[in-house]
Amino acid sequence: MKITDAQVEYVAQLARLELSPEEKARLRDQLNSILEYMEKLNELNTDEVEPTSHVLPITNVMKEDRVEPSLSREASLANAPNHEDGHIRVPKIIE
Amino acid sequence: MELETVIGLEVHAQLLTRSKIFCTCTTEFGRAPNESACPICLGMPGVLPVLNRTVVEFAMKLGLAVHATVARSCRFARKNYFYPDLPKGYQISQFEQPLCVGGHIDIQPNGGSKRIGLTRIHMEEDAGKLIHGENLGDPNSSYVDLNRAGIPLVEIVSEPDLSSPEEARAYLLKLKSLLQYLEVCDGNMEEGSLRCDANISLRPKGATALGTKTEIKNMNSFRNVQRALEYEIERQRAILSGGGTIHQETRLWDATQGVTLPMRSKEHAHDYRYFPEPDLVPLVVDEAWIVAVRATIPELPDEKRQRFERDYGLPAYDAEVLTTSRPLADYFETAARRYPKPKVVSNWVMGELLGALNRSGKEIGACPIAPENLAELLQLIDAGTISGKIAKTVFEEMFETSASPRAIVAEKGLTQISDSSAVERVVDEVIAANPEQLMQYRAGRTKLLGFFVGQVMKATHGKANPQLVNDLLREKLR
């Protein structure tokens, strides 16, 4: 399977990335070489192997339903490019 | 061509845990914006979510109550999309392996019974809240409050088994009632702790293939769900009858205009690129855990309704209304224990009490009349201390002041006059004062009995025993 320019553009759009034509070409080639490498796996018969989602042999890591103090609002908002009256302010989102 | 409607609902319910699903921030409602956030729900790099055990137990409790199969093993997945209310750039949800599969909810539309299949119930985190500029500050900005980000939700997906807006409403009400009985969600649609999206399509009657559907969002009350679906059915019907085709799209309900409108901002189809959440290990549920959770399930609305019909001899309608909420059912049962004429109690609860609660905007939990006091009021009627008519006045006073009926009757001097000589005196006075009506009555206009009864009641401020008044008048007017 070959990654096309259109697919690179589509994925970039989903990730909200703006790419120059040179970047698109470079990423297309890089993605293709990654996929080619992955093709090697297809040489193996994995019919009896369950897909791995986690490599650790651990299940059921849970916490009790207990409240602890949150971050101070000042700290939470410190990373926001813009904020007003305790809210993070972003360009208008039209729904 | 006759068309039939096919509806499936996706309901999101906020779970009543103390802390969020993957961190220790509080879920308390109404805190100042961004006060309940931490590195985990803010999506800071390097943090790890840890699953809240109570979320799993609440979701399982619901699953078991609707006869779903609880998966022995399930996983979380990342649902990737960009939106300012989602700080991580993905929502942690479940996709391929949800916690619960299958199950059903029975509804009773128009007295019948219909089984609505469920596809799945899964756990996920809520996103933050967006407030648009026109409602706060600069109209060209949107404002983000992340207190809600990470609040635990269950999504309950139904099969396309609903065939009318009334059925959709009945299903939602039943689900709300179940969630409240289980004490896992407060069920408040107006405040957003219960949210509903609908998939709706039409097809030729009797066809098996589904027509092209639209998804309706933004219906924030039970009534709006029904209105939006009614509108959408007519919109699709008009297009199909005119030979047109339906576009698969998401539409928003506009309650002010009473229409559904296509969403403007989503020009690209969603591609969520789900993949297993690497930060959360798989969840394994064993039989012992299921048994323990099952043991926490109380008597549910369906069982209670059947018991009310059977043990109290109530009509189906009464049993249905009284069991819609657990506090209401408990109220009825407490009153019926003290005044063992269930149908009389039911009439008062469904009529006077629910009416008064409705008018004052109060919930049954905040009812000013204790069930013991309602029972006492009914005993006073039976004992002849007050008439049924006066009882309504006493009831209103009880609702205002929470006082006991005995205290009100004593204080206001409302005791019924059952002393026949006292009533007879008034009856004689009334007859003497209305010679013309007396003549007409004796000439055959017996409907005038009502007039005389009214006059006697007026003269006694409603306190005369009505049966006695009737008997005495009939005798003396003859």
Image: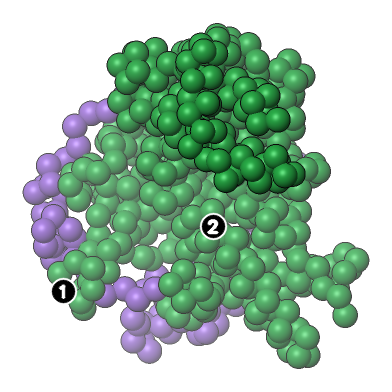
Chain colours: A purple, B green
The picture quadrant where one finds residue A17 is bottom left
**Left or right of residue B225: residue B39:** left
Residue B11 can be seen in this image: yes
The amino acid marked with disc number 1 is Asp
Are discs 1 and 2 both within one chain?
A: yes
Q: Is residue B463 above or below residue B9?
A: above
Kindly indicate whether the residue at mark 2 contacts the one at mark 1 (C-beta within 8 angstroms).
no
For label 2, the SS is helix
Q: Residue furthest right?
A: B206
Kindly report the distance in space between the C-alpha atoms of the residues bearing marks 1 and 2: 33 Å
For mark 2, what is the residue?
B223
For label 1, the SS is loop
The picture quadrant where one finds residue B39 is top left
Quarter in which the N terminus of chain B is drawn? bottom right
Identify which residue, B176 or B463, lies in the foreground.
B463
Residue A29 pos. (x, y %): 47, 78
